[in-house]
Image: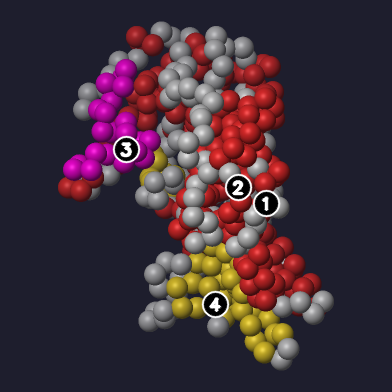
Amino acid sequence: MEATRLTETTVRTLKLSKGSEEEIIFDNGKGGVPGLGLRIRAGGSRKWIFQYRFAGKSRRQTIGSAAAWTIDAARRKAREMRVQVDGGIDPKVEKEERIEASRTTFKGVMNDYQEARERDLRPRTVVEYKHHLEIHWKPFHELPIKGITRAAVAGRLRDIIKTKGPVAADRTRTTLSAMFAWAIGEGYCDENPVIGTNRASKDTPRERVLEDEEIVAVWKAVPDNDYGRIVKLLILTGQRRDEIGSMCWSELDMKKKLLKLPIERTKNKRKHDIPLSDRAIEIIEGAGHREGRDLVFGSGAGGYSGWSQSKESLNELVNLKEPWTLHDLRRTVRTGMGRLSVAPHVAEAILNHLPAKLIRTYDRNTYEAEKRSALDQWAAHVEALLAGKLASNVLPMKA
């Protein structure tokens, strides 16, 4: 066992000593919480644990995955557990009692489900699931899990349609169905009452692609702040919102002009290297380093978080022909590269989309040179648009 000062960077980069299968690095540095430790195993597992003494015995309680729990969140949880211990409550026994309660109530199953899934889901998805289950399905919280009927679910969905709309109802319906499928596998119940209920919306796949003049309008309207820089980087790279919003300096190689996303930061759990154009580098450098913070954007425990309010403010500044979302920029980049004759497999590699199974099995090429050429070409296209040139003035580059 070892003591050191833990930071967001060290949590991701600490390695096991040679020949070691497991180590616990305790948070004993300045600002740390006694008893909080990061357990690292040879298989790649990184989990927060809390070690304490109760009734004269040493005990250990798992808090959660380091990929899902920030160091600040883990510290808060460890402090809560310390308060329990000081108050004569054993956190391990308290958790066991909560697990027992989860066998009978919706709320208990919900808590266990969230804890079980948080290590497999992206942080943004965890937040969405949490909102659906804790807010939309709150009237079910104290009901016996086995007593929830299809009629009760259908009735609640009708209420959600009236207050939040059909799309929101369908999404929260999907979350509930996933929870019941998991609960059946854990033996908490025998049936999924969501099966057989009606979907409320058509919710067809989005096809929105911004036109050239719309790209220019958005670029020129975004404010000179974190949100504005993120939007510009989304236009230049085609990456997912949270991949840019939670970008870290430790993931950037400014000399090689490369953003290197680890597997825990990508949707498909595959590491992803994104070549950066000169304009993208300029935008990132404009954010500036913030003392004691590895994250490029935002100011809280995680990355940038003011998405909804910032988008609403941007919508007031730029009035496009049709409603649009930040994810539409990703589709816009992919479509635009196709128009510039970028090879489809290269464009898909830039988006970190998994190729067809056969290609995935035999083709291990990462296409780094081709990806850089394509993104530089796309950046030149965007620069031309901003300069008032016609898209036809930007010609496809030769391979």
C-alpha span from label 2 to label 1: 7 Å
- What secondary structure is marked by label 4? strand
Q: Position of residue 390 (x, y in %)?
A: 41, 8
| Magenta-tinted stretch | 338-359
Mark 2 neighbour density, 10 Å: few (under 14) some (14–19) many (20 or more): some
Return the disc, 2 or 3, that comes first in the chain's sequence.
2
Residue 35 x %, y %? 67, 77
Whether residue 110 appears in this view of the structure is: no
**Of tags 1 and 4, which is closer to the observer?**
1
Q: Amino acid at mark 3?
A: Ala
- Label 2, on which residue? 148
Within the image, what quadrant is residue 168 found in?
Answer: top right
Secondary structure category for the residue under label 2: loop
The relative height of residue 379 versus residue 124 in the rendered view (above or below) is: above
Disc on the earlier residue, 2 or 4: 4
Q: Is residue 79 left or right of residue 189?
A: right
Instruction: Say if mark 2 contacts mark 1, CB within 8 Å.
Output: yes
Q: Residue at x 58, y 25 (%)?
A: 166
State which mark lies toward you, 2 or 3.
2
Residue 247 is situated, as x and y percent measured from the top left of the image, at 53, 45
* Residue found 62% across the figure and 39% down from its top: 152
Per the image, the residue denoted by label 1 is 143
- The verdict on residue 95 being magenta is no
Residue 349: mark: 3
Between marks 3 and 1 in the image, the one whose residue lies nearer the viewer = 1
344 magenta-colored: yes
Q: Are marks 3 and 4 in contact (CB under 8 Å)?
A: no
Residue found at x 57% / y 75%:
25
In this view of the protein, which residue sits in the foreground, 327 or 8? 327
C-alpha gap between disc 2 and disc 3: 45 Å
Residue depth check, mark 2 versus mark 4: number of the one nearer the observer: 2
